[in-house]
Amino acid sequence: MSTMRAMVLEEFGGPLVERQRAVPTPGEGQVLIRVEACGVCRTDLHVVDNELPETRLPIVPGHEIVGTVAGLGPEAHRFSIGQRVGIGWLGHACGQCPYCRKQQENLCDWPGFTGCTIDGGYAEATVADEDFCFPIASEVIPAATAPLLCAGLIGYRSLVMAGPARRLGIYGFGAAAHIVAQVARHQGRSVYAFTRPGDAAAQDFARQMGVTWTGSSGAAPPEELDAAIIFAPAGELVPEALRVVHKGGVVVCGGIHMSPI
């Protein structure tokens, strides 16, 4: 395959446009991935709406990618042809800045982001740094696994950063939240879900996930919380979350974009 179809964002606020492109060639330390599935994340909408200043145009969005290795660049040795892998949001880090040296690559001073500064997964193929690919079992269903490459990753990282909270609040009950809620319950925690005022569907969904309590974002839970995670891109939720956690509690801002606090 020398050419491929790709859905390309050519202007902010515009539609994705189907284009024929040359299949990319993997560079040093990169792999060529034949895309099997790519999820849609809220961050993809931030890219389209020009809410992330790093975004370059034209760009192929998509960073919840599952695919198989179809080619190896020079010095790429981690994976073999035909192996299934996943690709997430963080697609590159410099490896040299103080954050990279402390294994905090998500804070790298010179990062690359899949579907934002690096062409992503809304195409038949893409290339990725092998160091930022995840091995995935061959028997998984690609479309069901793709959301784990962002909602799962960022959700679990936020849960870890929340510490050993027994009473955990979650603001914005969507993809990441419903995964985190299930993990937290499995760990024996109590989960308190906060949604937009009047969002009965989200509150019903939260109850189906077994949360202890659910209410609107401005409501007070029945007891003080140990920590809260904010997934909704709404800055006004930060003081709300601080208000319901106890002194010394933790509030984690789990999203990539947030409106002013």
Image (cartoon, rainbow, N blue to C red):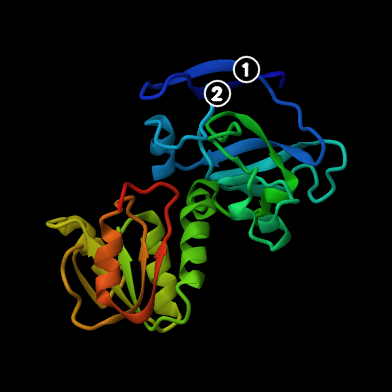
> Would residue 139 be visible to someone looking at this image?
no
Residue 255 lies, in percent from the top left, at 42, 53
- Going by the numbered disc 2, the residue's amino acid type is Ala
- Going by the numbered disc 1, the residue's amino acid type is Arg
Q: Which mark is residue 145?
A: none
Would you say the residues marked 2 and 1 are in contact, meaning their CB atoms lie under 8 Å apart?
yes
Residue 16 lies, in percent from the top left, at 43, 23
Marks 2 and 1 sit apart, C-alpha to C-alpha, by 7 Å
Residue 39 lies, in percent from the top left, at 47, 43
Which residue is more in the foreground, 205 or 127?
A: 127
Residue denoted by label 1: 21
Asked if 159 appears above or below 89 in the picture, the reply is: below
- Residue situated furthest top in the rendering: 20
Residue denoted by label 2: 6
Give left or right: position of 144 versus 231: right
Quadrant of the rendered structure where residue 197 is?
bottom left
Crowd rating for badge 1 (residues with CA inside 10 Å; few <14, some 14–19, many 20+) = some
Which residue is more in the foreground, 224 or 31?
A: 224
Crowd rating for badge 2 (residues with CA inside 10 Å; few <14, some 14–19, many 20+) = many
Give left or right: position of 159 versus 117: left
For mark 2, give the secondary structure.
Answer: strand
Q: Earlier in the sequence, mark 2 or mark 1?
A: 2
Give left or right: position of 225 versus 24: left
For mark 1, give the secondary structure.
Answer: strand
> Would residue 150 be visible to someone looking at this image?
yes
Which residue is more in the foreground, 246 or 90?
A: 246
Residue 248 lies, in percent from the top left, at 38, 81
Say which residue appears at 76% left-offset and 32% top-offset. Answer: 26
